[in-house]
Amino acid sequence: MDFFDPQQNNKTWFSSIAQPLHEAERLIASCEHCNLDGAEIPFDNILDRVTGSEPSVTDYVLEHPPKCPNWCREILEKTLVERKRMSIFAKKKQGLGLMRPSPNGN
């Protein structure tokens, strides 16, 4: 039995995205393993924002998943995370796809 999904043919796949992955990793404050109540955003949502990709047509395959800054657990595409709060300067750059956490994490 074939499990062909025609929607998959219209997807954009990112498998080697070192720079955007590092940008997204710096935005992680915690993950679902260490922050059950605060981690509500799938990591691929942050990747979509950093890469400027359309979520409905983009999937990610992480060769080297980032690690949670608290527990050092791997963060996969669908792992729930909490974003670091960003400074006003970083929020202005967000429109350019460049999101950086503030130095003090706020």
Image: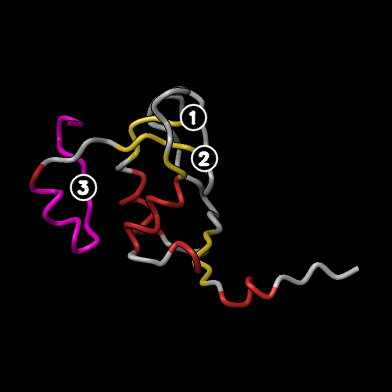
User: How crowded is the residue under tag 3: few (<14 C-alpha within 10 Å), some, or many (20+)?
Assistant: many
Secondary structure beneath dot 3 equals loop
* Residue depth check, mark 3 versus mark 1: number of the one nearer the observer: 1
Q: How many marks?
A: 3
| In the depicted structure, whether residue 42 falls above or below residue 71 | below
| Image: 93 above or below 3 | above
Circle 3 or circle 2, nearest the eye: 2
Residue at the spot of label 1:
32
User: Are there few (<14), some (14-19), or many (20+) residues within 10 Å of tag 2?
Assistant: some
Q: Quadrant of the C terminus?
A: top left
Tell me if 28 is positioned left or right of 8 in this view: left
Is 41 part of what is drawn in magenta? Answer: no
* Marks 3 and 1 close (CB-CB < 8 Å): no
Residue appearing at x 42%, y 41% in the figure: 41
Q: Is residue 104 magenta?
A: yes
Residue 32 % position (x, y): 49, 29
For the residue marked with disc 2, what is the amino acid? Thr
